[in-house]
Image (cartoon, rainbow, N blue to C red):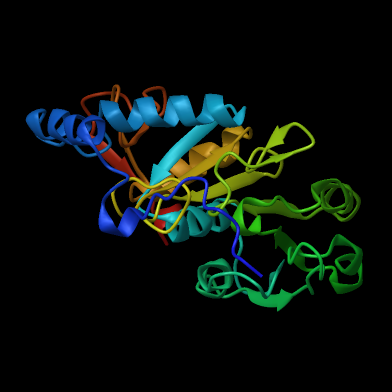
Amino acid sequence: MSSPEIKFDLQIKFGNAYGPEEEKAVLDVLRKNAPTSGEACIQFETDFAAYCGTKHARVTSNGTGALFVSLVALGVGPGDRVLTTPLTWIATAAAATTLGADVDFVDIDPVTYNLDPNKLEEKLTPNTRVVIPVHLYGQCCDMDPILDLAEKHGFAVVEDACHAVGGEYKGRKAGAMGTTGCFSFHEQKNMSTLGEGGMVVTDDPDVFERIALYRSHCTRVYGKSTKYCRLDETRFPMGKRFWWQDFDDTG
C-alpha cells in the first residue's frame, strides 16, 4: 500500500518552513532589544485568543510550562487525582506528578486513539481534581461527554491541545472548551515559534490572573507591565514599596 501524499511538506527541523517573513519578524524584535514579554508577545496573545475564541491567552516557554501553570492555577497538589490518556507525551502526566498529585490513565478509543469518554466515569473518584484530554495529532477528543461529566462531578478540564492548533470540535476550537487550553509551539508541532514556545488560553478571569501571576514569579508591580501582574494601589499605596511578591502563592 502506497503512502498518502504529503500536502504540506514543512520539514521544520531543516528550516525550509522559514523564510523572509520569519527573518524580518526576528530582526524586528532584536532591533527593539528583544524585551522579555514585549509588544510582540502581547500581540501574539491577543491574536491567538481571538483565533481560539477565548477571552484570555498567556505565552509560556513551552507546552510543558502551559500545562504546569494551568494545574498550579487550579490548585492541584498532594492528595488530588488527575486523569489523562496513556497515549501522550510524558509532559501531560509529569505536570501533575511534579505538583504531588496522583495520576491515573483512562484507556483510549481504538478508532481515534484519544481518551475514551465512555471509560472516564468509572475512573472518577471524589478527589479527582482535573481531567486532561489530549487532542492527539490535531484530532479533537469527543469533548461533550467529558464536559458533561465535569459539570456533574465538579472537576476541571485542562485541554492538552499541544498537538492541535486550529483543530475543531463541532465548531469550537481546540483549547477553548475546557477551563484552560494548553498549546506547544515546539518544532515538531503543527505550528512552531522557531524551536520552542507555549500558550495557555482560558475564559476564566481568576484562573487567568493566577496563570499570569505564576508565570512571572508571583510578582506584582505598579502601573502597566507586559510581564508582571498589577499591584493594587488601594492595598499598597505607591511610595510604600516598588513591587510585591505574593509569598502565599510562591510558597
Q: Quadrant of residue 230?
A: top left
Viewport quadrant of the C terminus: bottom left
Which residue is at 62% across, 27% downward? 53
Which x, y percent locates residue 182?
54, 49
Left or right of 12, for residue 249: right
Q: Nearer the viewer, residue 6 or 23?
A: 6
**Is 33 drawn above or below residue 164 in the view shown?**
above
Left or right of 213, for residue 165: right
Which residue is at 71% across, 52% downward? 157
| Total marks in image | 0
Which x, y percent locates residue 28?
15, 28
Please indicate, yes or no, whether residue 153 appears anywhere in the rendered image.
Answer: yes
Q: Quadrant of residue 101?
A: bottom right
Viewport quadrant of the N terminus: bottom right
Which x, y percent locates residue 169?
75, 40
Which residue is at 80% across, 36% downward? 170
Q: Nearer the viewer, residue 43 or 75?
A: 43
**Is 242 drawn above or below residue 102 in the view shown?**
above
Please indicate, yes or no, whether residue 125 appears anywhere in the rendered image.
Answer: no
Which x, y percent locates residue 77?
59, 68
Residue at the front extreme of this rendering: 1
Q: Nearer the viewer, residue 69 or 165?
A: 165
Q: Quadrant of residue 163?
A: bottom right
Q: Nearer the viewer, residue 44 or 219?
A: 44
